[in-house]
Amino acid sequence: MTFSLIGRCARTGQFGAVVTTSAVAVGARVPFARAGVGAVLTQHRTDPRLGPLGLDLLAQGFTAQQAMDAIVAATPHRDWRQLAVIDAAGRTAHFDGANVRPAISVAHGRDCVAAGNILRNEHVGPAMVARFEADLEMGLADRLVRAIQAGEDIGGETAAVVSASLLVVDRESFPFVDLRVDAHAAPLAELARLWALYGPTAEDYVRRAVDPDAADSYVAPPPKGV
């Protein structure tokens, strides 16, 4: 009962993940990304330990498929896991355990891979990839937000989604974007709204960390009613 996409921007080198589900706190469990290294998704009966493991393997020089093979070999409960990996070169890999419940939908594309389980149909993954690939002129966060909405529009999961997460890493050890929505009636619309608010300030928050003398002295508050 989760669908997600991890992707890479070939122009900037950013990596990111977007995910939604019908349970709360999806952003704390499913998406993992590291600047200059890649990204990992771990879902279905989620084991968050597998995300950092995958990133460590990628950092050691493993390809996406090599990292996936090692992750699967290392977990004794692999039959319950749905996993996806993207490496620094944009190569992708995925794994569906034997106990992952249908409908399952996985699709690989240019610099991206989408995965979902307990979905209304098998078109969710391809729809996300098609949307991601169609927006090459946009920034990575925008492409991810549009991709997850495409998955929802074509069917999404069997229950109403209530949480969503957008994670993007760029040059630093901390995320460029880390936005989360929980226990919300329309989490994808809310995620898009939060990104529209945060996006114009994202670069300055990085400057505040790495070069505070050059950062803006003031960040405008959200509009009234937000």
Image (spheres, rainbow, N blue to C red):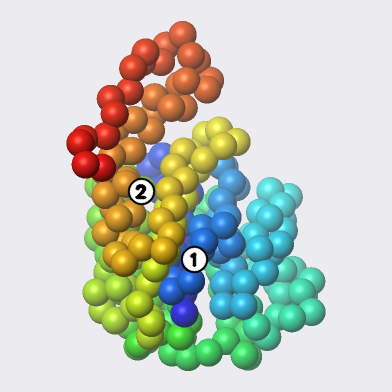
Residue 85 visible: no
90 horizontally vs 195: left or right: right
On screen, 124 above or below 85? Answer: below
Numbered badge on residue 141: 2
The residue under the point 60% across, 36% down is 173
Relative image position of residue 147 (x, y in whole percent): 31, 63
Measure the C-alpha gap from mark 1 to mark 2. Answer: 21 Å
Q: Position of residue 155 (x, y in %)?
A: 29, 81
Q: Earlier in the sequence, mark 1 or mark 2?
A: 1
- Residue lying at the far front in this picture: please name it: 225
Name the quadrant containing residue 112.
Answer: bottom left
Q: Look at the numbered disc 2 and give the secondary structure of its residue.
A: helix
Q: Residue furthest top?
A: 213
Residue 65: mark: none
Query: Which residue does the numbered mark 1 point to in the structure image?
Result: 24
Secondary structure of the residue carrying tag 1 is loop
Q: Quadrant of the C terminus?
A: top left
Q: Residue at x 56, y 37 (%)?
A: 174
Residue type (three-letter) at the residue carrying disc 2: Ala
Marks 1/2 in contact by CB < 8 Å: the verdict is no
Taking the spot 56% from the left edge, 63% from the top edge, the residue there is 30
Locate residue 135, reporting x and y percent: 25, 55
Task: Kindly identify the amino acid type of the residue bearing the numbered disc 1.
Answer: Val
Q: Is residue 81 visible?
A: yes
166 left or right, relative to 132: right
